Image: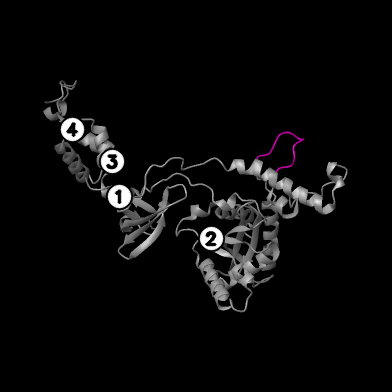
Amino acid sequence: MRVGGRLDNANFIYNKKHPIILQSAHEFTKLLFDYEHRRLMHAGPQLLLASIRETYWPIGGRNLAKACFHRCVRCRRMKGAIVTPLMGNLPRQRLLPGYPFQNTGVDYAGPIRCASRQGRGCRLVKVYIAIFICFTTKAIHLELVSDLTSNHFLLALYRFISRRGKPASIFSDNGTSFVGAYNDLSKFIKSNAASLSESLANDGISFKFIPAYSPHFGGLWEAGVKSTKYHLQRVLGCSNLTFVELYTTLTQIEAILNSRPLTPLSSDPDDDTPLTPGHFLIGRPLTSIPQPNLQDLSMSQLTRYQRIEQLRQHFWTRWSKEYVAELQQRTKWRACKDGLELGSLVVVKEDNLPPLKWRLGRVVAVHPGSDGIVRVADIRTSTGVIRRAFNRICPLPLPS
C-alpha cells in the first residue's frame, strides 16, 4: 500500500511521490527507525522522520521518531538529562524558633586578592571568607581566613562562637576544611571525655554534611555567598585592600545583609517596619537610626527586662506569621518527572569530563526523604560504590 498524495506532477522518483505506508507499531518499522538513526549519525527526530519519508510513510511517525531518539543510549548519554523529583520540604531546623545561629550553615567564598601591607612593593596573597548563616533568621556572620586548612577554619569557628554563641548544629558541604574540623573536634572530645564533665562532653556541636556535589542542598548559604560577593565586587572594584581594611569592609557588608527585610515591604506608612535579621540580633536593623523611646505606650507598666522580652516575643510572632508563610511556595521542581529505582542503569555526571567519559553505574540503594521521594542514591561503578544526589545522576533507557 502506498500514499496517493498530491505529488503526481512532480519530478521526483516514484517512491518519493508515493511512499510505502508502514504501521508504527510493527517491529520492522522500529528496526528501520533505529537503523536510520544510526546511519544519520544519531540524528534528531525531525531529520530522522524527514529521511524516512523519502521512501516510507509511517503512520504516527513523529511519535516513533521521538521514541527512537529518546531510547538511544548514546544520545541519552550525550544529552545528560538528570532526574527531577519534586522539590523537598524545608528542613525542621529552618522552621523552629530559637536563638540566632542555633542551627548554622557554613561555606567559603573566594579567593580574594589581599595586599600584605600598605605602600609600594606589597605582595598580593589569597584570602577567603567563611560565611555563617542562621537557618531560622537568615542572619549572616562573616569571618576572614587566610587559607583553607582545618586549623584556620577552627580559629574562625572559635571567633564566631565567642561573638554569636555556640550553635547546636552546623551544616556544610563536604569541603576538606569542614570535614577536617569535624574530625579534629571529634578526636578532641573522645580523647578528653574523661577529663571533661559529662554535661560538657555531651553538649557538643553536631556537624552534618550534605551529599557530595550537591550545592542545591545548601541553597541557604549559597545565597549568602552570592549576596556577599554582590556587595564586595562593587566596593572593591580593582583595588587591593590590606587584611585589616578588608575585614572592616566585610563587617560593614555583614551589617547591610543583616538589615535586609525578610518579608515584602508594605505600602501602608502606618505598618510596622519589616522584620530583618538584625531585629533578632540587637532588636533593630543594624543600619537604622536610633528609635524614639516607647515608654509612654501601653507596655510602660512593665519593667525594662519584661519590655525587652515582650519585644523579642513580638518579633518571633511576626516571624511565624509573616516570614514562614513566604516559605510555603515551591519555586521550581513542582512535579516528579522521573524517578530512581533499584537496578537502574545510570551515568554519573562529572564536571571536568565530556559526557562519553562519565562513569557508568547501577543503582544499588536509594535513600528516600521524609516525604517518600528519592533524591539520593548509592551507585556501584567500576571504582566502587559512590553516593550522589539527583542532580548528578542521568538515567539511561532500558533495552526493549
Tell me the element at label 2: strand
Residue 302 in the image: state x and y as whole percent.
Answer: 84, 48
Residue 157 visible in the picture? yes
Residue at numbered disc 1: 396
Specify the amino acid type for callout 2: Ser
Pick whichever of labels 1 and 3 is earlier in the sequence: 3
Specify the amino acid type for callout 3: Gly
Pick whichever of labels 3 and 4 is earlier in the sequence: 3
Residue 107 visible in the picture? no
- Residue 44's label in the rendered image is 3
Pick whichever of labels 3 and 2 is earlier in the sequence: 3
Cα distance in 3D space between marks 2 and 4: 58 Å
Tell me the element at label 3: loop
Pick whichever of labels 4 and 1 is earlier in the sequence: 4
Residue at numbered disc 2: 172
Q: In which quarter of the image is residue 139?
A: bottom right
Specify the amino acid type for callout 1: Leu
- Crowd band around label 2 with a 10 angstrom C-alpha radius: few (<14), some (14–19), many (20+): many
- Crowd band around label 1 with a 10 angstrom C-alpha radius: few (<14), some (14–19), many (20+): many
Cα distance in 3D space between marks 3 and 4: 16 Å
Which residue is painted at 71% across and 47% down in the image?
315
Task: Point out the frontmost of discs 1 and 3.
Answer: 1
- Residue 147's label in the rendered image is none
Q: In this view, does 399 lie above or below 193?
A: above
Residue at numbered disc 4: 54
Secondary structure, magenta segment, majority class: loop
Tell me the element at label 1: loop
